[in-house]
Image (cartoon, rainbow, N blue to C red):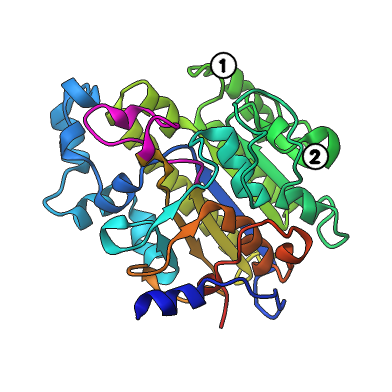
Amino acid sequence: MWIVAASVALLSVPAQGAGKTTHVIFVMMDGMRWQDVFRGADPDLLNKEHGGVGNVEEIKRDFWRDTPQGRREALMPFVWGEIAKKGQIYGNRDRGSDAYVTNGFNFSYPGYNEILCGFPDPRVDSNDKKPNPNVTVLEWLNRKPAYAGKVAAFAAWDTFPSILNVGRSSLVVNAGYDPLTIPPMNPRIELLNRLKIETNVLDEEPMDATTFHTAIEYVRLHQPKVLYLSLGESDEWAHAGRYDLYLRSSQRFDQFVKELWETVQSMPEYRGTTTLILGVDHGRGVAPTEWRGHGQKVPDSKNVWMAFLGPDTRALGERSKVAPITQSQIAATLAALLGEDYNAAVKNAGAVVRDVLSQ
């Protein structure tokens, strides 16, 4: 009987605009596995052979605990200490909460298109820097007078100007190693622009820290109504086979989310009126070897997770025994939290996740 009840709870409903949310912050990390979020550090990867771990004793000290609950709290203390207690988190397949991608490709550009547009598109079948033919929910909101110039996106991956089609959308987008040049400038932004270049470690993107701190500085200066932030170190270190650095970047992601949330809650423009969304573009394979990759040849990489925290989201915590949800539902849910009906405008977009909205 719970299947029927859960299915009803996830149906698309018209946005009523009666909630408290006036601002949305959507933060994504690239390719973090649901297994690590819900189970914590994987014992099969805490070694040199399969996890490429440099200092096994140190990494076990920092991330190994006797229970999955203890391990996941050590890895992501803010997610489990705040979001999972006061909001909702989906994707623990061990507890009957399935979240997955529908694009069939299980890699980045198709995933970001599905998430931000609300539907998969077979034309988006590579990570090439081709302008997205589809309008994202960010662009859709930015076209509305209430949000014009108040939607901003920051991303580590330098393909995001194409994903968000900046030539058409006119969105504020700062991605890759590009400096942020939108006035007013200040010494912190000037330093961050330098650090992006001078701390170049990864090929396609700067370290997450510079992307994050650039975004939070923009929030302080401009107070956007919708902020999108995408970080990428987790995927880079996984592809490199460095489970230790993957874990550390995931923990930093949690710390960044905590800092961002506490910052906006300290600002009168955001306090009590902001909803936070977390998500990933794809999952990964399982230990001992497939965890490094994702894509069509790695079926497990279709499985993802997502979380919601805000004044209109009931504290239902870690969801269990609910109907499956897909990443194509995030776009309409984001809009509905702001009182906007994305499904009415984009008929093929995934349905609103109703449980996330105030009842």
Q: Is residue 27 above or below residue 156?
A: below
Secondary structure beneath label 2: loop
Which residue is identified by label 1? 198
**Which amino acid type is marked by label 1?**
Glu
Quick check: 300 left or right of 118? left
Query: Could you say which quadrant of the image residue 212 lies in?
Result: top right
Q: How many marks?
A: 2
Residue 24, given in percent of the width and then of the height, sits at 64, 60
Quick check: 179 left or right of 296? right
Of the pair 206 and 291, the residue shown nearer to us? 291
- Tell me, yes or no, if residue 170 can be seen here: no
**Which amino acid type is marked by label 2?**
Pro
Quick check: 298 left or right of 286? right
Q: Which residue is found at the position 54% from the left and 34% from the top?
A: 108
Q: Which residue is found at the position 49% from the left and 47% from the top?
A: 101
Residue 184 image label: 2
Secondary structure beneath label 1: helix
Residue 76, given in percent of the width and then of the height, sits at 34, 50
State the extent of the magenta-drawn residues as a range: 280-299
Work out which quarter of the rendered image holds the C terminus and state it: bottom right
